[in-house]
């Protein structure tokens, strides 16, 4: 086996694919977007009309603007002060001052997920950098395009255990797509251009650029490289976008012979902006589409061919369909353990076609019959004319069975009743109402745990990139800061942060950022006074040995009030709609405190290590 | 496709025969399906990977960190410059089954600084290793040791009052054999480079990536 880089088609330049750029100059800022654009050009083309010399910190700002970035999340500190010293010269760059670097990293992540563009966060050396690490790891596991920039101590002090020095380059090395340490300002234009190119090209991911303080202060006239120069300078980075024609033929043949095919749509469909192609493909081949957690939005859930959310807390009917399928057509997903459960019992009758842009994902977790390495959009475009149009009537029996399973699975849930034991507030009802009252048109940002699964199951997603969730790393505390970035990335729609009381308490300092920067995030706090998923596992898997599952919290209304954020409260199903509407009516951030039932579980549930056919659907008589 | 080795032999025969038969009935729910084979799980053997990498700071760290993080155990790793100024070459030997090593190679390939990865385990190659061995030597047995070194195509590179340092080069097994031979005299210390490997014939892994 030999792998050589260099033959693949040249990736498109960012300007060819990037969606229309938004402007994030604050409303109270100085300039209209057009004027800002003119100023940007003038600055870049006109030999920097400043009355001082150009230093490394200027290069950073110029590079951001060149890359189409006009918004970043950061927190100052000693060695990154040279950058803050010049920021005032770049009014086109909106700096959001977060209250903790982790919040900044998650915000950049949320921004990237809703826009498809590269999110940018910054911090200082030492603790500033280590605080970013959780956010960088979150972005790595979910393949989010992100550039994280940190200051480092002056070159001469590196390795001397200087104040706030830590080997952050060594720390981020295994958890980034690539990372850099820059000690010379003349390297900065190239490194930053490479960082953005690597972050957004192929399988996206986070790139960390560590810059010493002296490099930020050093005078430089180094020019920014062209896109072609960047590519020429990265001979080892040639993502393979176009699929092999022979493999496509094999895939089409698999599809033609399958009687019970299922498409498994993952995050890759969203990264490749391939939702239209996916739909055309599914419709032509008449194949039901199941999606992963991060594949939510790849298909409109109301479409007749959308079958639903798969995996550990997915719908039973979806997992049944997978277990009885004779062909899994996986696109941009990686057969994560939360999706497959025990691989030995996973989809036992199915042959597998696996489309992924990353060759290392193919054959990693499951053996596949037809591997296809390529960009999901291009693969589906190439495949569409190669497959035969299927008459839905020929799948009548299959579809009838799937419909039966679906009725059975959805009907066995308390979902939608609004009631849960003794009239307590049921979380799935809250989620469903949020979905309804926002017309399914908002951005919904999950935290991690039960709230994440309730959101995935019950909100009803219609559009791509409207669901934001830390799937791979499962980072509690993700929701509020990520929603911050999501709201700034998609200002045209409402942004709802769905969080539990546990995750909320991890990053609630960002409430102040919401207030200070007038970021209109609506927070739905599902408070069961528990670490709900921990409690659920302890109840079902650890024999009711509840340790540390009870989580006392503050008076969340007072907390929000202290940050200047209006809070609304709902304790019964009857109060839910009013509370949601009140939050929607607020011009700015708002919090809704839902005091939900304390012991509600998310069902079905596949215990870790078990298979998709071993779902637990009820426990102790409660089948919520 | 049924003969395709990539199927790993794990697909039930009934599923494979699907296109030939009439409408296959949906799989009966009561029949326990055969377990799905995990990727890999085959016999482990020693593999040799050649990686051509950019000579950038930290590239060795990237490679070794990746192997550690992905749970691959490196037997030996030899790194050197090549005739191209900014390119280094690594020879990595590791144990694992074919699928696991393929996964290791794919993961290596993801590194931005890696230009090419080739598993040469099944190829015709020249594989050589160099060892330096400091052997205890006395006036009475020095001549005997020198004779042994000569027979083993080794070379004395240092002579001292109570020791000699010998350089031996050859396939790993030959070096093992030499060490076994001289162990009776007393080995004071040993250093080995690990295997360096090159394919036989005129094909060149480096030419393939010339820019």
Image (cartoon, rainbow, N blue to C red):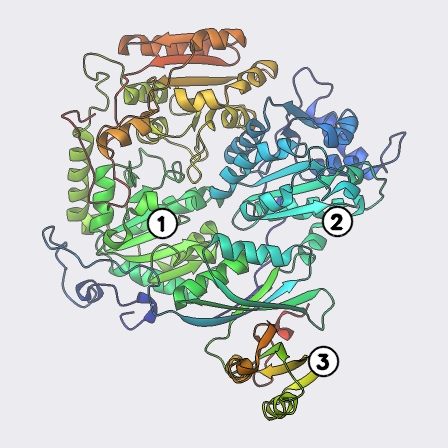
Q: Secondary structure at mark 1?
A: loop
Label 2 Cα crowd, 10 Å radius (few <14 / some 14-19 / many 20+) = some
Per the image, the residue denoted by label 1 is: A335
- Asked if residue A518 lies left or right of residue A346, the reply is right
Residue A145 at what x, y percent from top left? 56, 41
What is the CA distance from the residue labelled 2 to the residue labelled 3?
62 Å
Q: CB of mark 2 within 8 Å of CB of mark 3? A: no
Q: Residue at x 68, y 67 (%)?
A: B211
Residues at marks 1 and 3 on the same chain = no
Q: Nearer the viewer, mark 1 or mark 3?
A: 3
What mark, if any, has residue A376 been given in the picture? none
Residue A111, quarter of the rendered image: top right
Vertical order, A268 against A518 (above or below): below
Per the image, the residue denoted by label 3 is: B161
Q: Is residue B7 visible?
A: yes
Q: Secondary structure at mark 3?
A: loop
The residue nearer to you, when weighing A456 against A176, is A176
Residues at marks 2 and 3 on the same chain = no
């Amino acid at each position: 086996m030999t792998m050589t880089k260099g033959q693949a088609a040249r990736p498109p330049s960012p300007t060819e694919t990037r969606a229309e750029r938004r402007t994030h100059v604050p409303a109270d800022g100085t300039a209209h977007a057009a004027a800002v654009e003119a100023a940007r050009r003038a600055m870049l083309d006109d030999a920097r009309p400043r009355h001082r010399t150009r230093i490394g910190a200027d290069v950073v700002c110029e590079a951001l603007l060149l890359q189409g970035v006009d918004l970043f999340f950061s927190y100052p500190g000693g060695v990154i002060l040279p950058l803050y010293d010049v920021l005032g010269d770049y009014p086109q760059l909106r700096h959001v001052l977060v209250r903790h670097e982790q919040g900044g990293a998650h915000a950049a992540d949320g921004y990237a997920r809703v826009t498809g563009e590269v999110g940018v966060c910054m911090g200082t050396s030492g603790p500033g950098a280590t605080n970013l690490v959780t956010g960088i790891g979150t972005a790595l596991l979910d393949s989010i395009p992100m550039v994280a920039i940190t200051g480092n101590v002056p070159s001469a002090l590196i390795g001397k255990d200087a104040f706030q020095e830590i080997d952050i380059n060594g720390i981020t090395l295994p958890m980034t797509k690539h990372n850099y340490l820059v000690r010379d300002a003349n390297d900065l234009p190239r490194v930053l251009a490479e960082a953005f190119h690597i972050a957004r090209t192929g399988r996206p991911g986070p790139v960390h650029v560590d810059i010493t303080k002296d490099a930020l202060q050093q005078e430089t006239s180094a020019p920014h490289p062209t896109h072609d120069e960047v590519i020429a300078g990265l001979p080892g980075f040639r993502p393979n976008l176009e699929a092999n024609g022979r493999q496509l033929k094999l895939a089409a043949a698999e599809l033609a012979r399958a009687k019970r095919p299922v498409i498994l749509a993952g995050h890759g469909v969203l990264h490749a902006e391939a939702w239209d192609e996916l739909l055309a493909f599914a419709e032509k081949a008449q194949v039901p589409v199941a999606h992963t957690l991060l594949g939510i939005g790849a298909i409109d859930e109301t479409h007749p061919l959308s079958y639903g959310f798969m995996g550990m807390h997915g719908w039973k009917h979806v997992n049944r369909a997978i277990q009885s399928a004779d062909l899994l057509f996986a696109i941009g997903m990686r057969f994560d353990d939360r999706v497959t459960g025990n691989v030995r019992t996973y989809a036992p009758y199915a042959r597998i076609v696996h489309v992924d842009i990353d060759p290392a994902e193919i054959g990693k977790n499951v053996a596949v019959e037809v591997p296809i390495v390529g960009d999901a959009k291009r693969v589906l475009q190439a495949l569409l004319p190669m497959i035969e149009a299927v008459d839905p009537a020929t799948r009548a029996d299959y579809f009838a069975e799937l419909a039966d399973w679906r009725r059975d699975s959805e009907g066995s849930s308390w979902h939608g009743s609004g009631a849960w034991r003794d009239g307590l507030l049921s979380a799935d009802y809250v989620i469903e109402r949020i979905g309804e009252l926002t017309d399914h048109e908002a951005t919904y940002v999950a935290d991690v745990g039960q709230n994440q699964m309730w959101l995935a199951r019950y909100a009803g997603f219609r559009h791509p990139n409207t669901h934001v969730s830390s799937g791979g790393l499962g980072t509690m505390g993700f929701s509020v800061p990520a929603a911050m970035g999501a709201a700034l990335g998609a200002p045209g729609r409402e942004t709802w942060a769905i969080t539990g009381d546990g995750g909320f308490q991890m990053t609630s300092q960002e409430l102040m950022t919401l207030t200070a920067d007038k970021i209109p995030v609506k927070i739905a706090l599902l408070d069961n006074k528990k670490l709900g998923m921990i409690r659920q596992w302890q109840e079902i898997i650890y024999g009711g040995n509840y340790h540390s599952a009870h989580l006392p919290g503050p008076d969340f209304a007072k907390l929000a009030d202290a940050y200047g954020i209006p809070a609304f409260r709902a304790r019964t199903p009857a109060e839910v709609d009013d509370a949601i509407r009140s939050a929607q009516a607020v011009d700015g951030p708002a919090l809704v405190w839902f005091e939900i039932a304390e012991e509600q579980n998310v069902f079905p549930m596949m215990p870790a290590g078990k298979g998709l056919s071993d779902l637990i659907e009820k426990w102790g008589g409660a089948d919520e | 496709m049924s003969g395709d080795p990539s199927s790993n032999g794990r697909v039930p025969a009934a599923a494979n025969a699907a296109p030939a038969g009439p409408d296959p009935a949906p799989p009966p729910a009561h029949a326990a399906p055969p377990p799905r084979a995990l990727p890999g799980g085959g016999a482990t053997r020693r593999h040799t990977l050649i990686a051509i990498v950019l000579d950038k700071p930290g590239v060795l760290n990237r490679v070794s960190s990746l192997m550690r993080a992905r749970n691959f155990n490196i037997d030996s790793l030899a790194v050197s410059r090549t005739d191209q100024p900014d390119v280094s070459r690594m020879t990595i030997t590791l144990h694992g089954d074919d699928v696991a090593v393929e996964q290791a190679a794919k993961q290596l390939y993801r590194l931005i600084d890696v230009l090419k990865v080739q598993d040469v385990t099944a190829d015709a190659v020249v594989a050589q290793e160099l060892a330096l061995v400091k052997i205890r030597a006395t006036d009475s047995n020095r001549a005997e040791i020198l004779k042994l070194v000569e027979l083993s195509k080794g070379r004395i590179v240092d002579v001292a009052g109570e020791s000699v340092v010998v350089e031996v080069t050859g396939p790993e097994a030959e070096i093992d054999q030499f060490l076994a031979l001289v162990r009776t005299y007393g080995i004071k210390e040993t250093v080995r480079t690990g295997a360096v490997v090159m394919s036989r014939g005129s094909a060149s892994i480096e030419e393939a990536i010339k820019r």
